[in-house]
Every structure is written in C-alpha cells, then in structure tokens.
Image (spheres, coloured by chain):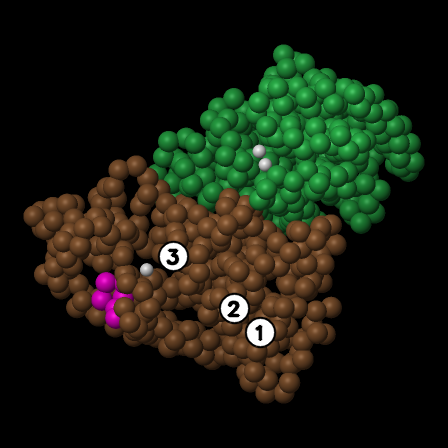
Chain colours: A green, B brown
Amino acid sequence: MAAAAVKNGAGGDTKADFARIYEALKEELLRDPAFEFTDESHQWIDRMLDYNVLGGKCNRGLSVVDSYKLLKGVDVLGEEEMFLASSLGWCIEWLQAFFLVLDDIMDDSHTRRGQPCWFRVPQVGFIAVNDGIILRNHISRILRLHFRKKPYYADLLDLFNEVEFKTASGQMLDLITTHEGEKDLTKYNIGVHRRIVQFKTAYYSFYLPVACALLLSGENLENYSAVENILVEMGTYFQVQDDYLDCYGDPEFIGKIGTDIEDYKCSWLVVQALERADESQKNILFENYGKKDPACVAKVKNLYKELNLEAVFHDYESESYKKLIADIEAQRSVAVQKVLKSFLHKIYKRQK
Amino acid sequence: MAAAAVKNGAGGDTKADFARIYEALKEELLRDPAFEFTDESHQWIDRMLDYNVLGGKCNRGLSVVDSYKLLKGVDVLGEEEMFLASSLGWCIEWLQAFFLVLDDIMDDSHTRRGQPCWFRVPQVGFIAVNDGIILRNHISRILRLHFRKKPYYADLLDLFNEVEFKTASGQMLDLITTHEGEKDLTKYNIGVHRRIVQFKTAYYSFYLPVACALLLSGENLENYSAVENILVEMGTYFQVQDDYLDCYGDPEFIGKIGTDIEDYKCSWLVVQALERADESQKNILFENYGKKDPACVAKVKNLYKELNLEAVFHDYESESYKKLIADIEAQRSVAVQKVLKSFLHKIYKRQK
Ligand SMILES: [Mg+2]
Ligand SMILES: [Mg+2]
Ligand SMILES: [Mg+2]
Ligand SMILES: [Mg+2]
Ligand SMILES: [Mg+2]
Ligand SMILES: [Mg+2]
C-alpha cells in the first residue's frame, strides 16, 4: 500500500509530505490492474499527470489536510492519517485538473499555469478530451483503493459526484449565458451571476475540501448544511473579489492583466453597473462591453467610475465579512469555527 | 418517485415500458434540486438528452431487463422491479451517449445515428464537451435517487466507475496507437487489437448489462469473474465480426459503406494480414493502407483475398463459438447459462 512508502517525520513538513504522496498515488495508478498498460500508454499517463495535476498552488488540496488537523485539534498527523487526508486533497487537485483541461478546450485558451494548455501540446490535440475523462476516473480509482473499507465510502463517492455535477451545471450555465448566440447583456443580472459562481466555483473550491475533512473525521454531512452554506457564500465572495481585481487589481501583483471587459464576462462589476445604470449609461455598456478596442474598454471603466463601483465593492466586502463572521460564530463546534475562519482569513481583503 | 409514473400492465410491452421510463427519468433530472435551473438551461438539457440518449437501438439497455428476467426466471416483472432494471438499462444508454458525444469530437466525425453529431449542431460546438460530462453525471444522479438505500449501492457505483475507467483506457490506447504522430503499421498486432477492443467496447457493451442484472438480483460480482471473462470474449468476437463486416458485409444490409481501410483502423483484418504477409506483401500494406484513393483500397482488399482472410475469419468464428459454448455450459447456474446464451445467439453469424 502506498501509505507505507511515505515517511512522515514528527512535526513533519506538510507540503513536502503532500508532494511525496502525489508520487505514491501516481505510481499506483500506473500499475492499476484494471487496465493492461502498454509502454506507450504508461508513458502517456505519466506525462499527462505531471503536466496537468502539478503546477498549481495546491490550495484546495492542502486545505483538506489543514482542515482535518483543525477538526482533530492536532498539529501533526500520524502517517496513515496524513496519507488519507492528502489523498483526498489530491483527489480535489485531480478534479481541478479535469475541469481545467476541458475548460481550456471549450474556451479555446492558449496558456494555463505558465505553459501551453494541454490540448495545444503537439500530438495531444483532442486526445485531451479523453485525458480529462481519465483524470476524473483516477479519483474513483484512488477512492476505491484507499477508502473502500471505510464506513463513509459511499458518502465520499456521493460527495465527489454531487460536487462534480454542480460544477458541470454551473459551467453549462456559464457557457450558454456568455457564449451562446448573439452577445446579449440583458441576460446578465445578479441572480445569474450568483448561480454561475456558486455552482461553477464555490462548491468544489470551498465546500469540497472541508466536506472531505469532515467525512474523514467520521462526521455525517447531513448535519453540516449550515457549514455548506457558509463555504458557498465564501466562495461567492472570493469570486466577486476575483472579478473586482480583474479591473482594479495591480497587474504586477496579481500576475496578469485583466480582460473580463474585453471577454464579455458575466462579471460582478458589469452586473452591478447594469443594476445602477440609467438608459443612456446602459447604452454605453451595450455599445462597448465585450470589444477588444482599448477605447471601448476605457469607456466601460469610466462608467464603472461614474457609478462608484469601487465603493460598492468595498461595501459588499465589509458586509459579506460581517455576515460570514456572524454565521461562523453561530456554529456550535469551536473546531469547525476555526476551520471556517482559517478559510476566511486567507481571502479577506486579499490583493491577489 | 418516478416509478409510480410508470404503469407496467401484466404481460406488458417491455420496449414501450422502457421508453416511458426514459421520460420519467428525464423529468426527474430536470427537477434535480442539486442545481437551480434557469429556463434556458432547462431547455438545453431537455433537448440535449433527447438528441443524444435517444435514437439508438437500446440493445444494451434492454438487455439489462432481459437478463434480469432470465436470472429471476420470470416473463414479466413487477412495476418496481421493471422500473429499477430499466433505470440501470438507461444508465448504460446514458453512458453510451457520453462516450459517443465525446468520441465524435475526438474523431472529428460528421454524423451519428443519421443526424449531425451533437457538437456540429449550430450553437452547440464545444459546449458538447461539457454536455458529455453532464451525461456521465446524470448516471450518478439516477443511481443516487433510486438505489441509495440498496445494499449493493456502493457496488453499483464501483461497477460504473470501473467500466468507465476501462473504456476510457481502451479509448486512450486506440487514440495514441492509431492517431498519434506518423502512421506506423508496425504498431498494429493482435495483442494491441485485443486490448483496444476489450477495453474500449467489450466491458461496457457486454459485461456491464449482465453485471447490472446480477447486482439487482442480489449477487456478489466477485463470484462472477468467469462470467465476466466469457462476456468480454463475446464482446471481442462481436468486434471482430464488426471489422469483418466492414470489408465483407453487404452495405445494403449493414446500412453503411465500410471505410476501415481508408481510415487506417487497427482492424482485425489488417492485423491478420500483417501476421501472414511476407516482406513484399507487407510493403503493399505499408504503401496502401490508410489512403483514400480507391486504387489503394483495392490493392489492400486484393491482398486480403490472397491471404484468404475470409476463411481465416470463418475459422475464428467457429472456434470462438465452440469455446464460448463450452465455457458457458461449464457455468453452474442454468439461469446464468441462459443469459449468456441469449447474448451469444443474438450475435453468432450475424450479417449486420
Ligand atoms: Mg477558461
Ligand atoms: Mg470557461
Ligand atoms: Mg477572473
Ligand atoms: Mg468514432
Ligand atoms: Mg474514436
Ligand atoms: Mg467498425
């Protein structure tokens, strides 16, 4: 069993252990008896995994380990527990890789994490679609291998299935609202924005890591719907920040130049602008939103200034924070409060 | 519950009941509380399901119902049992739709079941990738809704997960062997052919329906590895027939004109030819296989004739049949024998 291959010294370095567990999981997948690998297919998977699963910050994956430690009230996990928590963390990283590989195809993107998108690599092309499927399947393989005998095995499968379904549904809403047919800003409103954000991002990025840690702790997720709501709210808040920073963040600091206006994104900013604009201001949006021309972008940004969207955002931010803190402090378990606050403090007033 | 919506009269018409259960399942999926549908996304899924799940012959789905009846030794199922068996049958049809939608993108195909491939429909395009994912997710939703309380629920999830993984792995092998880089016939041999066929087709088309019926009957699949092997062998035999008919079948009868030679397919015929060809005959294959030019195709077909591949096929067919019948009759359960024979007799010496 792969757990045995991971030495987790006392007071060990979580990030290093987490990284080593990736190698152990990959080795297992490459010897999976459910398929007869040829040399070529073995090499293909090896390379495809390193290319797509690695290279991110692993925030989601590591937060399973961190949350589990807080729930247990310990600083260091035993070897077996570290292995199980990290495996669930890696399952989320695999899920993310699956979404990103396919999203890049659908968005016709060029780069991801500082390298060409996987489908743009020579000799990959549309094989990337099947590689996405294989990434998703690896999660089931990992869970089956290491969690089959656990009392919460079916709950774990249900959790990943339901979160994947919500994410794909949010992605559908995004695709048909923002890509389909003619550009039509009247489709954009705060209800649509919230739904896209919650389903496409919040469940898998915020709720899923904590839900994994709860299951690992022997908890029944049915008792944690308040926690789910708080995390989904936090995920929404996180995406609103993302939309805000795309326009108002420091490109040096966030590492990219925002293009949401040019890309006709259903951003929180445009939704707020539409809500506040009079007829003539709406026409400015209709005429200039979603165009590459820098003069058009400038007109949109100007309107945002007129409508005082920076202040609107800062109000939203402090209101959200107050509400989240109140909801968190209403939780009975102090350990759960700690988990939720650790998430909130990672993102509150972030600049990148 | 959807089951209540289905009236299954005594001695009822299985096909009509099966069709009605599709409508019930679709209605449930369109009111799934795990997503907040907008009108547009509701319409999108409704249309996407009818376009992609329907239109096939439903052989795989119906064979769950037929196998379950044989295992139980009854001609007619009760309403609840008919609903459950049909739901599992539809899950296989959904799985098939998921594979086909994505396969058509990867193969850059034009038509499927007599209509344009889904991704070629105006306003669909690469949204079809996400629709494929949603089709797969619907299986988990159906299983969760109707089988969550069954003692075999985790086994059912494991079964669909493992069969999906095998199919995607077979698809990978097919893609990297037959699409990757330069055309290289030396990669084609009987071992590669067998692996592609077994993993890409046999597990989901032959093993999965019977495995579903066995689980529904309360059986433990660990006791049925011989049955699995027989069904995978039958699936292999079925694909060899398919490869044979592509070249030697009557286009009037099979409803299409075979293009495996033009398409550089890793067909059983070319594998047999490579095994029997001398150096100069191999050169004929190297120079003419995988070219659209009818003169090249004719040279390949000529070589097949020289090598007597029709006779090689008929020997293979009768050997396979004998072996399968012997293996089937070695099964302890007469009901299981009946299930396996019903599959075999549907395909033995088929002309289309
Ligand atoms: Mg994208
Ligand atoms: Mg996208
Ligand atoms: Mg953004
Ligand atoms: Mg195809
Ligand atoms: Mg194909
Ligand atoms: Mg064929």
Q: Pointer 1: what residue?
A: B18
Query: Is B199 placed left or right of A327 in the picture?
Result: left
Q: Residue at x 66, y 19 (%)?
A: A298
On screen, residue B121 above or below A236: below
Where does residue A297 sit, x and y in percent of width and height?
64, 22
Mark closest to the chain's N terminus, 3 or 2: 2
Instruction: Tell whether position B246 is magenta.
Output: yes
* The residue positioned farthest toward the left in the image shown: B280
Secondary structure of residue under mark 2: helix
The one of B151 and B161 positioned closer to us in this rendering: B161
Query: Is ligand 6 less than 8 Å from the beta carbon at label 3?
Result: no
Determine the image quadrant of residue B286.
top left
User: What amino acid type should be assigned to the residue bearing mark 1?
Assistant: Phe
Q: Residue at x 12, y 59 (%)?
A: B302
Query: Is A166 placed left or right of A94 in the picture?
Result: right
Tag shown at residue B198: 3
Q: Pointer 2: what residue?
A: B61
Mark closest to the chain's N terminus, 2 or 1: 1
Q: Magenta region: which residues?
A: B245-250
Question: Disc 1 is attached to a residue of which chain?
Answer: B
User: What amino acid type should be assigned to the residue bearing mark 3?
Assistant: Gln
Query: Is B60 placed left or right of A293 in the picture?
Result: left
On screen, residue B304 above or below A126: below
